[in-house]
Amino acid sequence: MFPFRRSLVKLPVILFTVAALSAAMLAPLADASSHREAPLISQDPAVDSTDSYAFVSPDRPDSLTIIACFYPFQDPAGGPNFYRFADGAAYQIHVNNDGSAKDNATFTFTFKTTVQNPNTFLYNTGPIASLTDPNWNVRQTYTVTRDSDPGTGHAVHLVLGTDLPVPPVNIGPKSTPNYAALMRAGVHSVGDGYNVFAGQAADPFFVDVASIFDLLTIRPGAPGNAGGGKNNVAGFNVNCIAVQSPIAYLTKNGKLNSDAKDTNAILGIWTSTSRPKVTTRSAGSSAASGNLVQVSRLGMPLVNEVVIPLGLKDAFNGLNPTQDAATLSKPDGSIPLVQNPEIAGLLHALYGINVPPAPRNDLVQVFLTGVPGLNQPANVQPAEMMRINTAIPVAAKPNRLGVLAGDLQGFPNGRRLTDDVVDISLRVAAGVLVDGFNVSPNNAIGDGVDYNQAGFQFTFPYVQVPYDGFSQTAFDQTPLPAGP
């Protein structure tokens, strides 16, 4: 057994029943992933998790790609101090492969910023043609490590790469004339089948944030399945880290499992960021010290943003999955946040949609345990994380509605960049997977935004080239037509 190649437990793909699918769609329950989701972290955007994705790589199906994005709503023209990862923070991707809610593999990215010439205000003094170009003044590099079974007697620490360059931000046609080449140069093959990336990208999410938080106003009108929404994150960038790992290095049995009923194929995934406990400020400088403290956390999309109430949001960002069941459950074992979700009540109050009555036990599985027959590990301990059955083959024609549309490789079996988690979550909250509720308008509810206008790339890291500051002087918020 290779201790640093522990496979994440692949959930068995048993026959999917309507009831199982219901549970599968809950965790995202609403309308705008994790952008500015909690009061404290909204004041510290550099380490604010926005979205996490996990999917079998379409062009390399023996590998899993995990992407975590941070620093929401970056205006591409935000110079001269452009957006960067936080020095001293730990950006982490966590993988569980035995249903225990603990890490079996942890990938950690830490960053360092260097200034070549402190006597200029410029980020660059000329065109940046490569990642070693002397014209590039403010640079970041990173170290990426993998820890297997941390905290156990057989833990293994592996350094995958050091001093890896982060591509510059996309400034404009004169400063970064061939940004696509710079981004490709930022993909690093670090040996043993691993690829890693850290850098800026066009925000891969798509959602009508403004309408959702304006009291769930669907435009141009309910139910929202014919387009007409505005993708409010279009034109903004985020910072992303990504790992592409052989699946066999992650699973519990150390194999690429092909049987979807084999729970060795199931993995649980979440991301986090941590800051040093103490920050000391003085005029013109600051210094950090002390142990790392977790300040942001993200598994399934939308959970902290629209499921967790204001009074618990900051605390939830500091929890480990092992603490979820005790924190979210009542003494009688009920979980009101999940079993009686606020979003379902809003759909009923605002649009008169009949939704299943509480307690919504159909929603508990996705939120804490995974769905039996889809992505629930054997001997699972309840914990909120994204779960993926890596034995389900890549879909030849992915459907944005994922499992709801019969595409079992899509959300909530992991999450692809093209999965429409907002529409899926709204429809599940409306009860479409509960007997008697898969009717109009429940099965047509959406935000009118079905795709990301920027598109995606066909190879790792798959996220799109970031918007450049010179060209992106205004954001096109024209209502979108319906997607395919």
Image (cartoon, grey):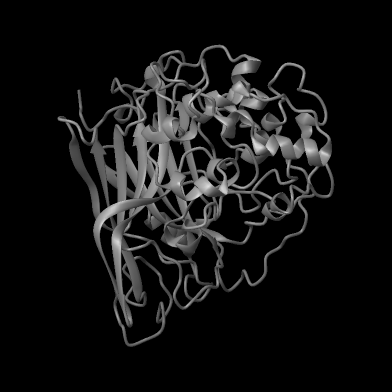
Q: Residue at x 47, y 61 (%)?
A: 45
Image quadrant where one finds the N terminus: top left
Q: Is residue 135 left or right of residue 347?
A: left
Q: Is residue 20 left or right of residue 385?
A: right
Q: Quadrant of residue 350?
A: top right
Q: Is residue 103 left or right of residue 306?
A: left
- Outermost residue toward the front in this view: 331
Q: Position of residue 101 (x, y in %)?
A: 37, 29
Q: Position of residue 170 (x, y in %)?
A: 49, 67
Q: Quadrant of residue 81?
A: bottom left
Q: Is residue 73 above or below residue 342?
A: below
Residue 113 visible (yes or no): no
Q: Residue at x 76, y 29 (%)?
A: 443
Count of numbered badges drawn on the protein: 0
Q: Position of residue 206 (x, y in %)?
A: 63, 49
Q: Residue at x 76, y 37 (%)?
A: 347
Q: Is residue 188 above or below residue 78?
A: above
Q: Is residue 22 left or right of residue 224?
A: left
Image quadrant where one finds the C terminus: top right
Residue 157 visible (yes or no): yes
Q: Position of residue 442 (x, y in %)?
A: 77, 30
4 or 444, which lies in front? 444
- Outermost residue toward the left in this view: 153
Q: Is residue 398 above or below residue 311?
A: above
